[in-house]
Amino acid sequence: MRPKRRDPETLLPLTPAMFHVLIALADGERHGYAIIKEIERRTAGDLRLSAGTLYALVRRFVTEGVIEESAERPDPALDDERRRYYRLTAFGRDVAQAEARRFETLIAMARAKQLVPGA
């Protein structure tokens, strides 16, 4: 018997910080500080997560099965052994995609009401 597939929409809507964490992990695994810096870089500094905020989100996402800690480690000579690396699970990718689709729907509605250029 196949396990029942979880509906990613049960976790929606995500907060902006949550969605940014998933976007940061969408193209590969990262450690916490790299996630923070990726979000800061991608938002031109408009969103800056504290370590406390990030790790609260990480704990929640790990519990929900959205992300997981990676067992793979870089060469110890190239990295700090204390770092924990995280990656999206298949369910986490589904959640990120569902949130992106939700935003696309909202933008389409805003365009239809001429609130966003490009209608």
Image: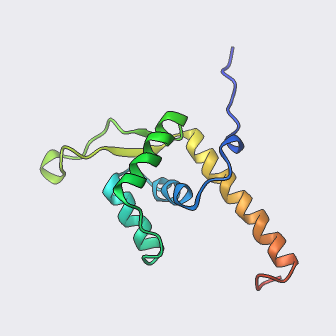
Instruction: Check the image and report above or below for 65 versus 56.
Output: above
Please indicate whether residue 98 sits to the left or right of residue 43 in the image: right
Residue 68: quadrant of the picture? top left
Instruction: Check the image and report above or below for 41 versus 23.
Output: below
Between 51 and 83, the one lying in front of the other is 51
The image quadrant where one finds the C terminus is bottom right
Please indicate whether residue 102 sits to the left or right of residue 31 in the image: right
Between 116 and 90, the one lying in front of the other is 116
Most distant residue in the left direction: 77
Q: Residue at x 19, y 51 (%)?
A: 79
> Can residue 67 be seen in this snapshot?
no
Between 24 and 50, the one lying in front of the other is 50
Give the x, y percent position of residue 33.
31, 57
Count of number-bearing discs: 0
Give the x, y percent position of residue 10.
70, 41
Q: Residue at x 40, y 73 (%)?
A: 41
Instruction: Check the image and report above or below for 91 versus 22.
Output: above
Most distant residue in the right direction: 112
Residue 59: quadrant of the picture? top left
Give the x, y percent position of residue 61.
50, 42
Instruction: Check the image and report above or below for 90 versus 113.
Output: above
Between 53 and 20, the one lying in front of the other is 53
The image quadrant where one finds the N terminus is top right
Tell me, what colour scheme is on the image?
rainbow
Residue 102: quadrant of the picture? bottom right
Most distant residue in the front direction: 52
Give the x, y percent position of residue 31.
33, 51
Most distant residue in the bottom direction: 117
